[in-house]
Amino acid sequence: VQTCALPICGRYNFANALGPAWETKVKRVLVCNSSPAEINLIQVALGKKFALHSMTRYKPGATEFSGMDAVVVDANFTEAQGLDFVMEVNATAHLPILIVTPPDDPHCAIEARRIGVFNYLVKTEKIYSVLEVALNEATEKFNDQEELKRTVLAQRQRIVELEKQLSRTGQQKA
């Protein structure tokens, strides 16, 4: 696990713009967990399939996300079950966030979804076996949603242009 003395920062780089290269690119994931032992288990589970960066302490306002493709935050990361950190990520970056919630607290997952995490995983013994799939799914679906948003915006702009042309054509005939 690569540990960052100063967390990574910036805006999300839309993977769809990379086309097929995205499939072979190693995804950079920020893992936020107050337990170094659990971070090591995540490293073992994900192997070399992801470039992992870790944070074990939250310093409000000091986190940046340049080049990250996703964030995994454990509910143990802050006293507010990581939700304060999630709100900061959402306010400063645009990328998918997975939260790992305690098995005995469904309200953590509900609140996390409400404030904008992409998805959640319940912390059980089997979490490490599904984490890779969950990360791949989150980044792929996130990128698909972003591409859809760009397509809708482009279509709206095209409609405005066509309406202007139609309006000009109508004025010329009158």
Image (cartoon, rainbow, N blue to C red):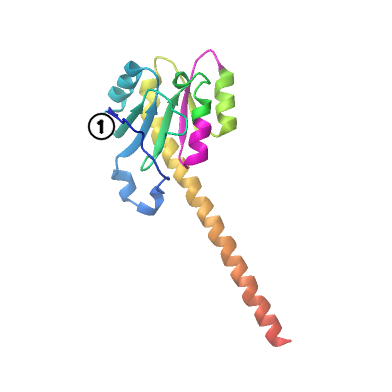
- Please provide the residue range marked out in magenta: 86-105
Q: Quadrant of the C terminus?
A: bottom right
Q: Position of residue 21 (x, y in %)?
A: 31, 50
Question: Which residue is rendered at x = 56% and y = 61% of the image?
Answer: 155
Above or below 68: residue 161 = below
Residue 117 seen in this snapshot: no
* Mark 1: amino acid: Lys
> Could you tell me which secondary element the residue under label 1 belongs to?
loop
Number of labels in the image equals: 1
Mark 1 is surrounded, within 10 Å at the Cα level, by few (under 14), some (14 to 19) or many (20 or more) other residues, namely few
Above or below 10: residue 78 = above
Question: Which residue is rendered at x = 40% and y = 33% of the image?
Answer: 135
Q: Position of residue 142 (x, y in %)?
A: 47, 42
Task: Give the camera-side residue of 81 and 158.
Answer: 81
Q: Position of residue 90 (x, y in %)?
A: 51, 37
Q: Residue furthest bottom?
A: 173
Above or below 126: residue 54 = below
Question: Which residue is rendered at x = 46% and y = 30% of the image?
Answer: 98
Magenta-colored stretch includes residue 3: no
Question: Which residue is rendered at x = 42% and y = 39% of the image?
Answer: 139
The residue beneath circle 1 is 48
Residue 166 picture quarter: bottom right
Magenta-colored stretch includes residue 87: yes
Q: Quadrant of the N terminus?
A: top left
Task: Give the camera-side residue of 60 and 119.
Answer: 60
Residue 136 seen in this snapshot: yes
